[in-house]
Amino acid sequence: MLTQPKPKQKPAPPPLPPLRSARPQRPGVVRRLLDRMDPDSRYDARRVLVLICLLPLLLLLLILARGAYALQRDPLLLSYGFTVLLGTITMFYLAYTRYDDPSERPMRKRPKDRDSFPALPTTPKVSFLLAVKDEVECIENCVRSMATSDYPVQVVVVDDLSEDGTQDVLRRLETELDIKVICLDRNLGKKGALVRPCEEADGDIIAMTDSDCFPAPDALARCVRALVAHRELGAVSGHARALNADFSFWTKAQDVWFEGQFRVVKATEATFGTVTCVSGPLAVFRREAIFNYLPAWANDHFMGAPFRFSTDRQLTGYVLGQKWKGQALKCQYADSPFVTERDYPERRWRVGYVYSAKVWTNAPPRFRPLMKQQIRWKKSFIRNLCFTGTFMWHMGPGPATLYYGHVLWVSAAPFMAFRHMIWAPAHGEAFLTLLYLCGIILKGCAYGLAFKIDNPGDNHWIYRPAMGLLSTLLLAWMLPYSLATIRRGVWSRSAT
């Protein structure tokens, strides 16, 4: 068994670039006033403020409904636009009225049987894991950020047969920091490399990050606090932003897009306890929520071939769906030490999101690596749909609508782009093309303004409409391509 390291003075990490997104911000006046209110008054005040902010979108929704006769020639555009606009309004409303950071206050919506979940120790042991391959340029800052966490952790770094000098850097850091380095003698892939230290790590909580990420010193402590305070949570995700946000147009656009995907999308899912992807930059799990399912994750196959990507969504799916899928997965690997060592009961765990647990990641700085990243993510989306999609209807109408609505939107996006950007102008329907583009820009502006409100000193919000156009008109086409090439895959980030 790996033992908890003895506390010793933590060395300061080497300085990181002075990025605007990495500076802590003082909460605005409205936020400070809301924080002083009792829970019920705060909830009512937030509802009023959010409804005022959403008023333009609500009016547009009303106009669209009343003007439906004008689009009778294209009912597909009408229904698609109406559904997307209604979904956007609903997500903003839920994210900004019902979401509470579980590390700061109790969540409003909690299961009635929460006391039936086992409680964590007040100060649980934490194993902080990292798998790396050929990351010599950024690995030192990443490992130092893990080792200098405010929370006492057992840091284990697994090198998956690097060939660029990464092992030399890790060996040097092992002699300097309280970390353990495991150098594999054969390539296992990212999932296999992360599962390897779990055979020995004894943490009550298993946390993971990516090799190009830098968690804030208090990020892990906040996630642990959320899990201790909410025993029904089997996992939580941190909040990621782009570390290299000022590098290029592509990184600026991704930075503001990251913010929306976490602050709006994950916050909305978190109000139901059904966050469907505990993202790689900071993924924190209770041991008993994933331990029995690690061999299934490491040996995941899809369409007759090993699925090499790390699939954060898939591991999250094992937490959410073990009540319905867990027994079959454990039977499949009944001889694995992860099952025979201790058989944890299948529980209906919730999965949350901690807004205040900040972590920064290097976003792809140019177009080509961005496309490769999107292809990886689309492949993981497709694979996970065939697992999580089979049980999300059990989770209730709210979570099911969010999940299957998102699946429908992602699946329809390339067809709608073709319908309105190619077919419509070719058949003299240029007005429909203009209307379609205006809808994309409007949605991007709504997310951009939400970013501006949450980050008053950051002007990256102006890039959100451009990211909306890029995502809808170009990145959407990565879905059919990813499906056609889903059997190919390497996990090394250097390949991007």
Image (spheres, rainbow, N blue to C red):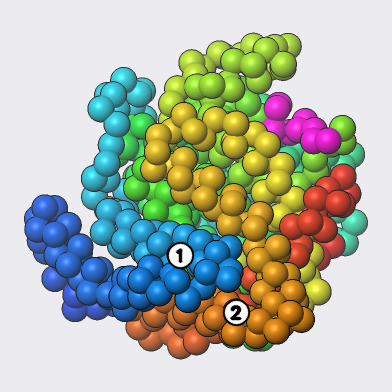
Q: Nearer the viewer, residue 53 or 43?
A: 53
The first of marks 1 and 2 along the sequence is: 1
Residue 439 in view (yes/no): yes
Residue at image point 72% right, 17% down: 333
Q: Secondary structure at mark 2?
A: helix
Give me the disc on residue 82.
1
Give me the disc on residue 489.
none
Residue at image point 13% right, 59% down: 44
From this view, report whether residue 212 is shown above or below residue 386. Answer: below
Q: Quadrant of the C terminus?
A: bottom right
Q: Which residues are magenta?
A: 295-303
In-image side of 397 versus 472 (left or right): left
Q: Secondary structure at mark 1?
A: helix
Q: Exactly how many numbered labels are in the figure?
A: 2
From this view, report whether residue 446 is shown above or below residue 3. Answer: below
- Please state the horizontal and vertical placement of residue 28, each as a whole percent of the image: 24, 78
Residue at image point 43% right, 42% down: 399
Q: Quadrant of the N terminus?
A: top right
Q: Amino acid at mark 1?
A: Phe
Q: Amino acid at mark 2?
A: Leu
Residue 4 in view (yes/no): no
Which residue matches tag 2? 432
Q: Nearer the viewer, residue 91 or 221?
A: 91
